Structure formats: C-alpha cells, structure tokens
Image (cartoon, rainbow, N blue to C red):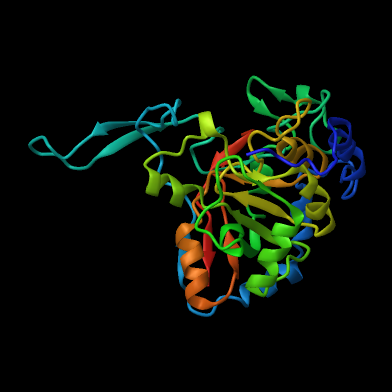
Amino acid sequence: MAIDNRGLTDADVLGFMDSLSNWGRWGPEDQAGALNYITPERRLRAFSLVQEAHVVSISQPLATTPGPENPRPVLHFMLGTGEGAGATGSMDFLGMAYHGMTISHIDALCHIFYRGKMYNGFPAAEVKPDGAHKNAIHQVLEKVVGRGVLLDIPAAKGKEWLDPAEPIYTEDLEAAERRQGVTVEPGDIVLVRTGRHKRARAQGSDGWQTQGLAGLHASTLPWLHRRQVAVLGSDGISDVMPSGFEGIRLPYHVVAIVAMGVHLLDNHDFERLAEACVQRGRYQFLFVLAPLFLERGTGSPANGLAIF
C-alpha cells in the first residue's frame, strides 16, 4: 500500500523533535516524561471507572518457538520437574530479549537516542554496560496507572483488521473517538488497535518481516502531543512499517520517546479487550501496568490489565 505522507518531508518530521519537545517541561532532572500528565486527580477518576471488577489482560503469551516471525525466542528451561520419584516441587528459567516485534513490553525512555541524547537531554552515554543510569524503567514502576482508552481503528473503518503497512491518520483516530463516544484527554493511556493478531490468527501468519505492520503515521504526532497522551500502546509497535520516511525510519519511536517522553507499549493483544468494550458499550477503563523491578533496565516485558 502506497503511503500518503501528507506533504511531510524527512526534515518536517525531524522538526517535530523541537516543536513537540517536552524537555524541561517538568524540570531538568525529570525521568517520567509524559507520565507526569497522570495527576492524582486524574488517577482517582480512573478508579471510578471500575464497576464490575472485570479484568482483561492485553499481553501475548511469551513466544518460545523460533521462526521467521520470532527470530529471538524466549528461553524457557525447566530446572526441576515433578517426573522423578520423591519430587517436591518444580522450577524453571526464563531468558529473553524483549525489544522487537514479538514480546509484549514497555519501552523505557532510555531505549532510543537522537543525536547523542535521550529524553530530557540526558546524554546517551548515561546508558552504560551495567544499564541505564538515566530514564531507566525502574523510574516508573508505579506510574502506569490511569484511564485507559481503546481506539479501535479497524472497527471505525468497518473492517476486522488493517492491512499490513496500512497507515493510521489523525482523521482515523478522531473517527474512532466519535464512533465509540469517547474523547482522548490529558493523562490518558491510549491503546490503538490495528487488528494485527486477529489477522495473523485468521491467515496463519503475521508476516511483519516481509509485509510490514499497520500503525500510526508520523503526521499524527502533533495530535498525540496536543492531546497530552501519557502512554501509547499498540498491537504492533505504534509506528507504521515502512514509515515512508528514509531519514527517520521509526518516527514514533524517535519523536514520541525522545522528544515527548511518551512510554510506548509494543506488541500487545487487544482482541479480548475489544470484545469486552463492545459487550459493555464503553471504551474507557482503569488501566494498570507494572514493569519488572529491573534497576537500570531499558524497558520490561509487561502484562497490562484493563479493569472495568
């Protein structure tokens, strides 16, 4: 599918690094970024959305089988089983490289650099062999709690899923808002459904390596900034792939993370969540995600929970 870049050039998108920057907005030492939009008052309003105590996970199963679409599978070894005589318990080992296109995870603000800097102007050199000394994931252990909003883009377009490499534009986001009777507000945790996993299950393959991924076009970045979104989640990686820009191949990862300080949730599964929203006729809920307490981590595998 040919991408309409809406008249934007590489230089225009790189210009977003300045025009959409939140550096210094919450002080020179801030490491929480757009999570500062989730004030105590907004969090309390999010708690009021819980009416049934119905909980929906948005995580995918950890992918342990290697293949073209999972080049770095999760390592899962049993250290103790119940098969031997006198067995008293079991243990296992997990190892994973969670950044990429497969494992559900959250990106820390130290994950991406631009011209030797990361969010809020900290030098990239602050990420050292022992991990990140600025913008690490342990800085936001208790902060990803607030109002979640699902924007179901395929449903707003009258189809089950978006095509591979299909871009999402601002009018698509706002059409989903109108259809669902919800408006993205400051401090929201916004989850954008493309239907990636429903398509993969129906067709027997994801195909991201050869076909690309549906996702947000760079022209929507000012909308994200204007709405003061706290966290952005996707069933892909937020960025449409290919993006249509040569000089900045993943505009969302560069501009949203580095300039705006928005944590990204990658490779989550919104199918059960979309069903729950349809059943209830509402697309807002309390959303909670707790990263692993990994000091100096560049992100974390994650299991986000939507609570109705």
Residue 172, image x and y in percent? 70, 58
Q: Nearer the viewer, residue 25 or 222?
A: 222
Residue 183 position (above or below residue 81):
below
Residue 117, image x and y in percent? 82, 28
The residue under the point 55% across, 46% down is 163
Q: Nearer the viewer, residue 79 or 256?
A: 256
The residue under the point 65% across, 40% down is 240
Count every numbered label the image shows and give the total.
0
- Which quarter of the picture shows residue 180? bottom right
Q: Nearer the viewer, residue 175 or 302?
A: 175
Residue 69 position (above or below residue 6):
above
| Image quadrant occupied by the N terminus | top right
Q: Residue furthest top?
A: 129
Residue 208 visible here? yes
Residue 176, image x and y in percent? 66, 65
Residue 295 visible here? no
Using residue 150 as the reference point, say whether residue 94 is left or right of it.
left
Using residue 43 as the reference point, say whether residue 207 is left or right of it.
left
Q: Nearer the viewer, residue 242 or 46?
A: 242
Residue 289 position (above or below residue 244):
below
The residue under the point 69% across, 67% down is 177
